[in-house]
Amino acid sequence: MLTTAYAPGKSILFGEHAVVYGRPAIAVPVTQVRACAIVEDAPRGQGISIRATDLGLTHRVGARVAANHPSHALQATVVNTLERLGVDRPLDLTLTVSSTVPMARGLGSGAALATAIVRSLADHLGHDLAPQEVSDLVYQTEIIHHGTPSGIDNTVIAFEQPVYFVRDEPMQLLRVRRPFWLAIGDTGMASLTRIAVGDVRTGWAGNPKKYDALFDGIGAIAAAAKNALSSGRIGALGKLMNENQALLQALGVSSPELNRLVAAARDAGAIGAKLCGAGRGGAMLALATAAKAEGVAAELLRAGAVGVIVTQVGGAVTED
């Protein structure tokens, strides 16, 4: 018997870094890229084996592994899921995982892979986990990846809907009144969330007044963006994106590569543009109309992006 499950990537529209300190953030799923997990029954006595084709590794669950090894998070996801399902008998399974979500780019690659693993194991073993249960399990994997995650990645990916997220408060699913397009440009540089978040925390500890003011500004932008999304004011959304980018630059989490792509997108007609994720590399996103999206994507490639994902957020197209 074979069971397959998928999970999308994600992009944070507003609220990076500030969300860790209790301010709101907005994130959307990116369905053009996704992680895949396939579970199949294996010969008796094999135990559970994980094959990560993209990483070129095979790991037997239960074998000792260093905490910084890629298989550590994969194994922990499997173990946590089986514990949650109440499975205490030996299992013989082969779990094959792969992903088209770019790694270390702020697009939720680790959370997407963990979500696909949780879903595939639950389905294969005859359990129906609600999205919140999936999210809670994936959050445990996010701790391994990022140390002090906000919880937004596992939430938006598990629910596969735009979300308005405030840490330790009930998550709100967002209705996007008018669809829009995002061109997500990859700088080609890894963005290590744990390091960027740690540096911001160090800065906050040294100057809480300055950093809290920046976090407050980012949070206010996210709250205003929620209203813009629900009322279909895409122009206002782009302006808020530009304001958010300025605050992220003030936090010190942008980079020359990100700034160059943001400027190129705006010059090409994007309504707004900003980095997404932890920053210091990784990816940026540009908000565009249907007519401009491909042109913005082409300009990002000319400006040095190593790849661009164009994704639609929201329902049916309703051009004025």
Image (cartoon, rainbow, N blue to C red):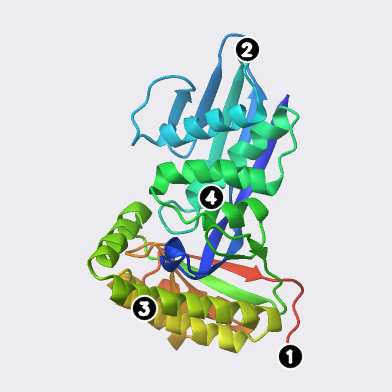
Amino acid found under the numbered disc labelled 1: Asp
Crowd class of label 3 (few under 14; some 14 to 19; many from 20; radius 10 Å):
few
The residue wearing badge 3 is 213
Whole-number angstrom distance, CA of label 3 to CA of label 1? 38 Å
Asked if the residues shown at circle 3 and circle 1 are in contact, with their CB atoms under 8 angstroms apart, the answer is: no
How far is mark 2 from mark 1, CA to CA? Answer: 59 Å
Q: CA distance from mark 4 to mark 2?
A: 29 Å
Residue topped by disc 4: 100
Of callouts 3 and 1, which one flags the residue occurring earlier in the amino acid sequence? 3
Res 299 seen here: no
Which of the two discs, 4 and 1, labels the residue nearer the N terminus? 4
Q: Given the current orientation, which residue lies at the most extreme top position?
A: 45
* Mark 3 or mark 2: whose residue is earlier in sequence: 2
The residue nearer to you, when weighing 311 against 196, is 196
The residue beneath circle 2 is: 43
Q: Residue 320's mark?
A: 1
